[in-house]
Structure formats: C-alpha cells, structure tokens
Amino acid sequence: MTDTKASLSLEGLDAPIELPIYSGSVGPKVIDVGALTSKGYFTYDPGFVSTASCESKITYIDGGAGLLMHRGYPIEVLAEKSEYLESCYLLLHGELPSKEEYAHFKNVITNHTMVHESITRFFKGFHYDSHPMAMMCGIVGALSAFYHDATDITNPKHRLISAHRLIAKMPTLAAMCYKHSQGQPFMYPNNKLGYAENFLHMMFGTPCDDAKVNPVIARAMDKIFLLHADHEQNASTSTVRLSGSSGANPFACIAAGIATLWGPAHGGANEAVLSMLEEIGDVENIDKYVAKAKDKSDPFRLMGFGHRVYKNFDPRAKVMKETCDEVLKELGLENDPLLNIAKKLEKIALEDEYFIEKKLYPNVDFYSGIIMKAIGIPTDMFTVIFATGRTVGWIAHWHEMLSEPLKIGRPRQLYTGYDKREFTDIDARPAVNPPHLP
C-alpha cells in the first residue's frame, strides 16, 4: 500500500521523523502520522476535515467531480438499475447479489419487519407531540433489551443477524412514531408488500382499509432510501464507528448515529428547505429573498443549495429531481403554491450567474424535501426517514470496523486550560461571579 514516505523536520529533534504515505484505490494519498506520538507530538485538525479516521472499502466520494460510489458503483447507476434492498446487500456484502441471493435476502428482511409486541408499550411513555427523532433514539436503543440473543459483536453471524433486524425494523419503528403522533393505531407490516411500499402502508394505512400504495410513490420512497443509504465518514457514521469501537452493542451504536443525525447541521437540511419555502410564502417574494441570500450582511440563507462535500454538483440531486417531477405529476400538484416557489427557486439557481459561479446547485435535500411534502409526510418525520435509509450504511461501517482488529477510538486535544494550580481552601477564596451564574 505504501512505497513512499514523508520526512518531517521539527525544531528540537536531532533527526527528521519519517511518516509512511499510503495510497488508496482512488482518491488523495494519506500520511500516517502515528509516529508523531512517540516523539511528543500529535496533529491538530478541528472537525477532522483533513484526517482519515479509518480504512474503508464501502463508499467513495470525490466532491470536486461530483462522484459518489458504493463499492465502486456510481450512485446514479444504482438508482437507475437497482433498488434499495439490492443496494443494502451490496453495502453489507461488497458485491451485488445473484438472483437467488437477492431473493433470499429480501425474504430474510421481510420476515424481520415485525417488532416485539412489548415495544408498542414504550410509545405510551412518549407525549403525543414528542419529536419523532426523540422517540427513535429511545426505541432503537431499547431494542438491545429485546434482541440480546445476537449481540456478541465478535461473532460475524450475530453481526449479520443484527444487521438484518435493524434494516427490517427501522421502517416499522419509523411508521410507529408517526402513528403515535397522530393518535392512530399502529399498522403491522404486510409481508406481501415491498420494502418502501410496506413503509408507506404502515405510515398511511389504517385497519379500516385494504393495503393499497401508489406504485409511483413507492418507487420515489425507495429512491429516497437508496440515495441516503450511505455517505462515507460523515458525523453520524463516524459516531457509529466511535461507539462501536468501545464494544457497544449494535442497537446502542445505531441509536448514537440517530442522535447525531438529529442535529440540524447534519440531518435537518430537507426539513430546513420546507421551512424556508414557508418563510418565503409566495412566488412574488422570491426576488426579495434571493437578494437577501446574495447579501453577505443578511443572515438569510437559501437552504437546499450547494453542499459541504460536493463542490460541483450533488450526483444524487439529478436522480431526485426526476423522481420529484414524476411524483408531482402523479399527484397533480404541479400548481401547489409551496411547490411553485420551489420550482422557481430551482430555475433561478440553475440560470442565475451568482449561483452558477458559486456552484450553488440544488442538492438532494432540496428535492427530497419537496417529494416528502407532496406525499404528505410532516417535516418532523423527514429526518426519521433519512435515518431509516441510512441505517444500512451505519451498520455496514460498524460491521466492517469489527471485521478488523478492534482499536477503541481516542481522539486527542490541544489543551489550553490552566497548568497545575495549588488548591485554596473555600474560606480563603475571593468571591467570583462566573458569567453563567446570576
């Protein structure tokens, strides 16, 4: 993997420190800085933006080229030719399944979709207007109390069983969160339905009606799950890996990922898109808000445009735009007031020199938020659906990490606090009014 080295000269050291340079299959070369610790140094990289925390074979992103690949397959190819569960198999096992393997995998997932009946009682402890992500954090963490028969993380078979359970049960739990907020009865999974179709059935179906899901909407939901399945070492995935490095059970690790995803800087982008559209309120106000977005002194920002990783375009956005157009046409919502605002904003972003120069193209969150709004999914459920799709990525990274020799994560810090001080008895201390106290 390496045949070159970097040489680092530091003042006070007699000889330079040699640091191996590794080359991945694609992407930038990586300098191994592990030798610095023995010399009394370590690196400073807030946010880990220049640090590879692990070696992985799962997902590769080239933000400059607008490239996202799962196991070597571009995301747009998977979105066109595959479906969510097939991509789940790919992420977990490294290769696309044969026809027989895929049939078996789908059967396993289908037969794990039910949850223990006692779990339904957990929801009674949540207020009806609790945020769905609050419920998801608690419920997923609690799964380890019900499925502890396969939580030996050193056993590959146990890890696979846990992976199947999590992928299968997340849509069921997500739908239960929604039903609880609506005061409606929970819907059991229907083994005759596909993955995304079953989720929509559990979300919007009632015991009074037969299962009937619009196939166009089901395909759109499948694509939303697929396009969010994994995104390399982001905050939530890194959290799952860090939690897993301690030997924690898989349900606790995924609950930690859900908690991280809940943060508005990570998983709340598509929810922020709808909030922005509602703030704009009317097509007539768009020019005013675009001007505000261009004004550096104005705090207003257009949500759903540009991406922290993709410096050119988000490869998932083109797929999501096509799906968005299909859904709006199917539902007859081409003239919905809020969606009209979104369409005009999209047109401006693709044609206005300001947006083109800064490469502020509509991203996947922009279109997925519109789709979910059109389907009738409330905004506080958006991140729950994101978490449902992302579960396979989290569990794939967790499984990959545990397949290698385990080393607990332990980031370092640049300490800037007090040096060693003498303790003063309380009677001799001067009165101090810390800023956080009245």
Image: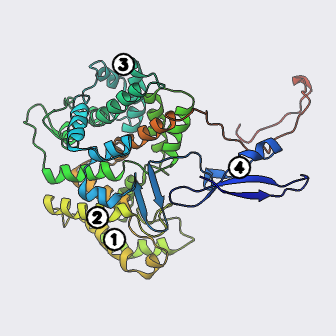
Rendered residue at 38%/24% (across/down): 143
Rendered residue at 22%/64% (across/down): 325
Residue matched to label 4:
33
Label 2 element class = helix
Rendered position, 251 above or below 22 = above
In the image, taking residue 180 as reference, residue 62 lies left or right, namely right
Q: Are marks 2 and 3 in contact (CB under 8 Å)?
A: no
Amino acid type at mark 1: Glu
Q: Residue 181 in the image: state x and y as whole percent.
A: 29, 35
The answer to which of 102 and 328 lies nearer the viewer is: 102
**Numbered tag placed on residue 346 in the rendering:** 1
Quarter of the image where one finds residue 330: bottom left
Query: How would you rate the neighbour count of disc 3 (Cα within 10 Å): few for under 14, some for 14-19, many for 20 or more?
Result: few
Q: Are marks 2 and 1 in contact (CB under 8 Å)?
A: yes
Amino acid type at mark 2: Lys
The quadrant of the picture occupied by the C terminus is: top right
Q: Nearer the viewer, mark 3 or mark 1?
A: 3
The answer to which of 186 and 181 lies nearer the viewer is: 186
Q: Are marks 4 and 1 in contact (CB under 8 Å)?
A: no
Q: Earlier in the sequence, mark 4 or mark 2?
A: 4
Q: Residue 377 in the image: state x and y as whole percent.
A: 26, 47
